Image: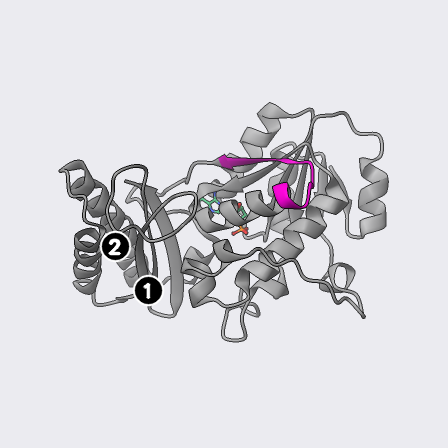
Amino acid sequence: MKVADTVATMREALRLVNRPLGFVPTMGGLHEGHLALIRRAQRENSTLAASIFVNPAQFGPQDDFSTYPRDMTSDLAILEDEGVDLAFTPSTGEMYPDGFDTRVEVGALSDCLEGKSRPGHFRGVATVVCKLLSIVRPDRAYFGRKDLQQTVVVKRMTADLNLGAEVVVTPTVREPDGLAFSSRNAYLNPKERAAAAVLHLALRTAARLRGEGVADPRRIREEMEKLIAREPLAAVDYVSVADPESLEELDTIDGPAVASLAVWIGKTRLIDNLSI
Ligand code: AMP
């Protein structure tokens, strides 16, 4: 595996690779969710690139940028084991050198849900993904459904800015009790880890109600909130029943719908979603 930590060495390493080129951007802290993306990209492409970059621009001032799990040595060993051909591991200064003054802003899709709770988050995401796709120029870029709004924002931006990569979205990988794998799960103590199962329970409740014919999203949101309220270590940030493409909250469900939520478990904020 070739490891490049500058844009110039990454570009040089990419010059003669066999196409199609698959690319998996990550912030490290690698887990089974990342591995599913990497394995899918491995199967579908002749060359596989991945990046590890904890992007300061997508963290708010109160967010966990300084404590975000970082273990470059172990992450690189995992990428190597998985057969990644090229790992891009830029420093913050390499991605945002002195004088950097351009941001990518995706409109309405960035304002709701995560964007409402974390103002500026998707400007940071869109900016870094735009830069990464411009540097790597993959044929396909892989993103997890766990971050549903991110996939919608990235697809919009990639189309709008003609970045030329196919955006592939892969299913959420979960622990046996339904908790979605996330680098942030490492923050949870054993009691919090047990309590965190409430996210998936709430999503399953939403799916069950919908399956029983409930078409009123208010009723579904209420039941999700009630269930989470019964878990003392959990506090709801938002629950949503929305259109999976426009991400607008639904007044009534008469087609595809996605339930999503952000929940604090102690000091850790977790998100998840499920089609219902
Ligand atoms: P991150 O390192 O958290 O920025 O995630 C890198 C990529 O992995 C993103 O496209 C995420 O959506 C995806 N991802 C994270 N967790 C999971 C999971 N549990 N299942 C599937 N994909 C995931």
Is residue 53 visible to the viewer in this orientation of the structure?
no
Is residue 214 one of those drawn in magenta? no
- Residue sitting at 37 percent across and 50 percent down? 272
Is residue 44 visible to the viewer in this orientation of the structure?
yes
Q: Position of residue 97 (x, y in %)?
A: 79, 65
- Residue sitting at 22 percent across and 51 percent down? 217
Q: In the rendered image, which quarter is residue 44 located in? A: top right
**Which type of secondary structure does the marked residue at label 1 adopt?**
strand
Looking at the image, residue 273 sits to the left or right of residue 32; the answer is left
- Judging by the rendered image, the residue that carries numbered circle 1 is 265
Pointer 2 or 1: first along the chain: 2
Label 1 residue near ligand 1, CB within 8 Å: no
Identify the image quadrant of the N terminus.
top right
The residue most toward the left is 212
- Judging by the rendered image, the residue that carries numbered circle 2 is 198
For the magenta stretch, what is the residue range? 159-169
Camera-side residue: 233 or 102? 102
Identify the image quadrant of the C terminus.
top left
**Disc 2 from disc 1: Cα separation:** 10 Å
**How many numbered callouts?**
2
